[in-house]
Image (spheres, rainbow, N blue to C red):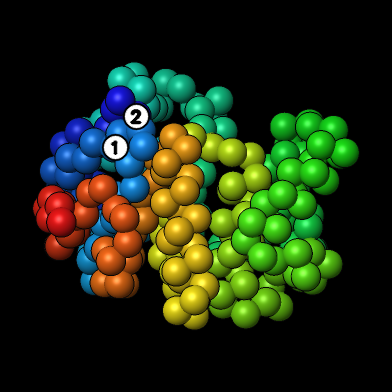
Amino acid sequence: MEVLTLKDIWFRYPASDEYVLKGVNLRLNKYELSVIRGPNGSGKSTLLLVAAGLLTPEKGEVLLYGKPLNTQLPQARIKLGITFQDPEDQFFNATVYDEIAFALRQLRIPEGIIRNKVTEVVETLNIMHLLNRPPYKLSGGEKVRVALASVLVYDPEILLLDEPTAYLTTNAKSELMKLLENLRDCGKTIVVVTNDSEVIKYRIDESYLLDNGVLYNTKT
């Protein structure tokens, strides 16, 4: 089942003559874990922001379940979970607990249910010991896991993850990729953008290369 589709996406930033994305086509299906690799500056982060509806392409369109994403916003944001390349860009709260609980509080979910959901996700990611700490004072790997927890806690259907293995130890990276594999097997659509070549060693379904704004399918 096709979940998220990017059709002939062209994007450039204001005051720039150079396109960051050049005719990108991407089809993401349910039960698929896709990886988009490319060097720094290749447009990977921009591609995720367009896919999430946070940037509007100059040409082309983004479809969510076959309908234009821009006509489904802001309600559709609950279906899309995005993490940024720099986790601090999405931190707003004084403690890790409040950071993870933030999205659920915006949905006016009762605090007791929020507490249970936060507990479940932090146990899954092995970050229970961080709950009372300021997110800005964590290590790089801890920040990555807190950022992911703040998305997983509201159970989005689609995960758009920017460099989620950055700063992780080998063991932590393996644990994360196995978690993503399990989430895929449970029906999530997941996209990982990265310059980490090791991620293709895991059970991924589609592999792409983004080079100079052009997306190539390199399925393994």
* Foreground residue among 193 and 155: 155
Q: Badge 1: few (under 14), some or many (20 or more) residues near its Cα, within 10 Å?
A: many
- The residue where tag 2 is placed is 3
Work out whether mark 1 precedes mark 2 in sequence or the reverse, and give the earlier one.
2
Q: Secondary structure under badge 1?
A: strand
- The residue where tag 1 is placed is 28
Q: Find residue 129 and report its horizontal and vertical position in percent.
A: 78, 70
Q: Find residue 67 and report its horizontal and vertical position in percent.
A: 34, 19
Image quadrant for the N terminus?
top left
In this rendering, is residue 105 above or below 17?
above
Disc 2 marks which amino acid? Val
State how far apart marks 1 and 2 are (Cα): 6 Å
Q: Find residue 27 and report its horizontal and vertical position in percent.
A: 23, 36
Q: Which mark is residue 155?
A: none
Q: Residue at x 69, y 73 (%)?
A: 136
In this rendering, is residue 7 above or below 165?
above
Image quadrant for the C terminus?
bottom left
Does residue 50 appear anywhere in the picture?
no
Disc 1 marks which amino acid? Leu
Q: Residue at x 36, y 56 (%)?
A: 192
Q: Secondary structure under badge 2?
A: strand
* Foreground residue among 8 and 148: 148
Does residue 36 appear anywhere in the picture?
yes
Q: Residue at x 46, y 71 (%)?
A: 173
Q: Are marks 1 and 2 in contact (CB under 8 Å)?
A: yes
